[in-house]
Every structure is written in structure tokens, then in C-alpha cells.
Image: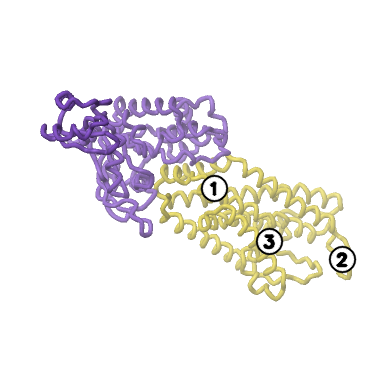
Amino acid sequence: MTALVRSELQKLFTTRLWWVMLLVMLLFTGITLAVTIGFAGVQAQGGPALPGRGTLEFQQAAWTAGAGSSIFVMILGIVMMTGEYRYQTITTTFLSTPRRGRVVTAKLVAGLLVGVLFGVAALLLTAAAVIPTVLIAGGEVALLDGGVPRIMLGVVATSALYALFGIGLGALVRNQIAAVVGAIVWVFVVESLLTAIPALQDVGKFTPSGAAQSLIAVEVDSGFGAPDLLPAWAGASVLVAYALVFALVASLTTVRRDIT
Amino acid sequence: MRVMTAIEIRNLSKAFGPVKAVDDVSFSVEAGTITGYLGPNGAGKTTTLRCLLGLVSADGGTALVDGRPYTALEHPLAEVGAVLEATSFHPGRTARDHLRVICTAAGLPASRADEALEQVGLADAARKRVGGFSLGMRQRLALGTATLGHPRVLILDEPANGLDPAGIEWLRGFLRHLAHDRGVAVLVSSHVLAEVQQTVDNVVIIARGRLVHQGSLDELTGNGERPVRVHSAEADRLVPALEAEGARVERPGDGVLRVYGVDAETVGRAVLDERVLVTELVRERSDLQAIFMELTREA
């Protein structure tokens, strides 16, 4: 099994998409960080002032920056699966490993590892931006307290699980363009509406991103009111449940299908 | 000790919806021989091979490699090599990386990748992305992929597609070397008989999903009688004399006769006796392609 996971990672790292996605993810995270830092301490019109750069609340908000970039890990997961069908390399893959369940498991494990890698990369970028900002503002850097470890863990876990979502979706849909477009519409339109509009949050908190937000929830009043979220433990359970469902979907759709 | 049949297909059937792609097909391939698996496009060749390789699940029958289903092989690449279609590469990956990924999954040393590239004449292109490869180079890379694990059984689906004449000549030599020197069992499919007739020892012919012939190449050519063809403006006058000699005469028209059952000398004597002017008198060559067409036309 270790050999199969290594082979899957080799597949990913011998093509160019992974670092393109890594750069895009870091760019996206960087923009989020720039906005968070830029607006820290600014008085919103008619609302309360956002926490200043020296405060713990600012640090909590900034550390969540990487969570919004999970879509890019998901796209990478989609491509790990659909790319095999698109270029018909799935034939060679199943010829060297005819027990397809093992191929799917190896892909899921490789996806988790890549997701963790992306999550950690986002955290490193965040650290590089947040720590100097806090120090310059004269604040006290919080790394192991003030809920920051939970947020960090949440960012990495979200990233890892979204890779699994991508692999599952890719196994189900197989058409690369359809799967990627579907994922983008889901994350940026459907989930955004469900989690942002208060009347829909009863549903929204059970979506993957709603559940992910509960892992990284911070008490910052941005003037829109606190979102309705699940407790962190429940959010984690919902995410893991999604991951299991997607893994199951990936296995069942892949094991039986004729490769013509 | 009985030598294990390398490939054994028994009563294999597979339907896609209402279409019977493979219908009760049985044949076997022995070690050290090259078997041509022939049939027109859409005859069911690819489906048979994919069933054999565990990529498509058969509706009925069995397809065994060394006595076991492919999916039960512990180290499949060390037992079976397969070339299915030349397009199954990621265009952004280099030839060497493509092979190394497979080496890793199959537990083969990474050095095999370079050896295989050397063997198929792609050593110079090892670090180039496959996207820039010609069809012929892709076929070579596919062959390199198939031989990574030094398999004792080699299965190739239309391997000559996209190869130039020199490439086809190289492929013939490569397959003959593997089969006759190394004892590999080779099963190679093609829709062009002429492509494989110089290479194969045995032929299996399939049409519309059904087996229509299995045997040696010699048996196949023996099946067709070689008529004597006569061209004459006065062909009509020849027929009674020929029939008197016990010949069976076919008249495709235009002054052409096809004479079966007698040799060219008998026909010539009839021409002399009847004092008929002929412009052509020749024993037709055994036309494999015609036999092939005849066999696959009405299945």
C-alpha cells in the first residue's frame, strides 16, 4: 500500500498542476491576509471598529485566512481522479494494480497528505504575514493559546478533507471540466449563499464549508451579526462524515465500472 | 508435466446494452508463439482483450492468464504486459516519469524505466514530455511500459497503428525476438491481416463478436482454393471443354473465367485444343486478404 501511495504522489508531482494550484492557493490566501490586515482597526460605517492589529481577535481572524483556499485543494483532488480518465492512464493504473479498491485507497491517502501539505503551506504564509504585523503593532504574538492552535488545526483538517471531497466528486463525475465547474459553483455560489444568508444558515451550517467554519469560528463582530454555526466537535463530525461518504462514492463507482 | 497454456479464453461473452460485443469466444495461446487476433473494426477484439485484462467484466465465460484471472495475479506486470492504446499517457509527464510511476506501483526498481526506454529506442527522449511525442514514439513507449516487468505473456491491441514502415519492421523483429528467443506468448490484434501475416504463427479470426477461424496461418491459406484465371474475348467457347475436364468454372464477366479443380496445364491444353485466343492465363496467388474478407463478411 505504501508503494501505491508513493506512486500516486509521484503521479501528482511529475506533472505541473500541483505547483500551479499551490501558487494560486497561496495568492488567494495572501489576498485574504492583505484585506484582513488592511482593514484591521478600521471603523466600519455605522458599525463597531474591527479589532486592531495588536489584539488577539485580529490574530484569530487572520489565522483563518487559509481556510478559504480549500477549493484549490479540492480541484487538485478532482484532477487526481478525473485526469486518469481524461488521459486514459486509468488503464495503465488498473493493469499494474487490478484490485481497484487499493488504487482508490491509495489516492485518498495521497490526497489527504497533499491536503495537509497545502494547509501547512497556507499556515506558513499566514505566520509570515501575521507575526511581523502583530509585533510591529506592539501586540503579543499568540501561537499556542487564545484558540489559535484550534484554528490552525481546523485550516489543515479542512484542506485535507477537501482533497478527499475532490477525489470522491471526480470518481463520481469523471468529466474533469464538469467536476471542476461543479465544485466552483458549489463552493462560491451555493455554499456562500447558504452560509451567508441568516435565513438559510440552518441548512448552511451542515454544508462542508459551514461545518469547516465551525472549526475555525472566532468571535469577531464584523457588523453582520454572528453566523449560526455548529459547535466545533459537531462540525468536525459532519466534515468527517462527508469525507467518508465521498470515499465510499469513490470506491463504489470505481471498482465496478468497465474501463473501455 | 503439461505446459501451462499462457492465455486461455473459454466461452467468453460480453454485451454492451443490446450489442453482443463478444459472443461465446474460445481460443488459447501457447508460450513461445505469436497469435494474430484478427477481425474488422468493431468485431470485438478490444473487448476480448479488455476482459482478459480485468478492465471489463465479462457476462459469461472465463479468460485466464497462466491459469488464473488477471485480477488474481499477485504481480501482474511481471506476468503480463499489455499495449492497449497509444494515447494513454499524461501529456505533461516525461517518458521516464511515466515509467517510474508504474515501477513504483508495481514494486519494480526505478532502473527498469531506463532499461525499458533503451530497449524500445527512446533513451534520447526519456526526459521529454509525452505531449510532444509522435504516434510512433507513443507506441514505442507503450511497448516499453508493457515490458517493464519482463512478462511471459504480451498482449497488444493494434500495435502497428501509427507506425511508419520502418517502425512496423522494428515491431515485427521485437515481437519475434520476445516469442521465439524468450518464450513469451504474444497475442496481437489487428484489423489488417497483411500487417501481421509475416509475424504470426497462428491466427484467430473474429467477426461480429463470434469466432470464425482458429488455426495456423498455413491452415488458413489452405482453406482457399487457388483458381486459374483466364482472360479471353472468346471465353464462352472454352467453358464446355474445361467442364469436360471436370473443372468448375466461375464467370465474373468481362471475358474472365475462374477455373477451379484443374491445374494451369490442363487449362492451357484446353485453350490449344479449342484454338482460342487468350490474353491472360495465370494461377491466382493465394490472397490472404480475400480469405480474410470472405471469412469475416458473413459471420
Colour of chain A in the image: yellow
Left or right? Give the position of A146 relative to B30. Answer: right
Nearer the observer, disc 2 or disc 3?
A: 3
Mark 3 closeness class: few <14, some 14–19, many ≥20 residues within 10 Å: few
A135 left or right, relative to A110: right
What percent of the width, then of the height, locates residue B191?
36, 39
In front: A54, or A9?
A9
**Residue at 52% across, 60% down:** A246
**Mark toward the start of the polypeptide (1 vs 3):** 1
Q: Are marks 2 and 3 on the same chain?
A: yes
Q: Say which amino acid is labelled 3.
A: Phe
Label of residue B13 in the image: none
Q: Nearer the viewer, residue B258 or B178?
A: B258
Apparent side of residue A115 relative to residue A50 in the rendered image (left or right):
left
The answer to whether the residue labelled 2 contacts the one labelled 3, judged by CB atoms less than 8 Å apart, is: no
Q: Dot 1 lies on which element?
A: helix
Between B216 and B96, which is closer to the camera in this rendering?
Answer: B216
Q: Which residue is mark 2?
A: A44
Judge if badges 1 and 3 mark residues of a common chain. Answer: yes
Q: Which mark is residue A188?
A: 3
Residue A114 appears in the figure: yes
Task: Give the alpha-carbon distance from disc 2 to disc 1, as whole Å.
Answer: 46 Å
Residue at the spot of label 1? A83
Tint applied to chain B in the drawing: purple
Q: Chain of mark 1?
A: A
Work out whether disc 2 and disc 1 sit on a shared chain.
yes
Q: Does dot 2 land on a helix, a strand or a loop? A: loop
**Secondary element type, mark 3:** helix
**Side (left or right) of A19 relative to B106:** right
Q: Give the amino acid type for the residue marked by disc 1 in the picture.
A: Gly
Give how far across and how far down residue B112 sits, in percent. 45, 30
Q: Where is residue A200? Give x, y as percent.
A: 68, 74
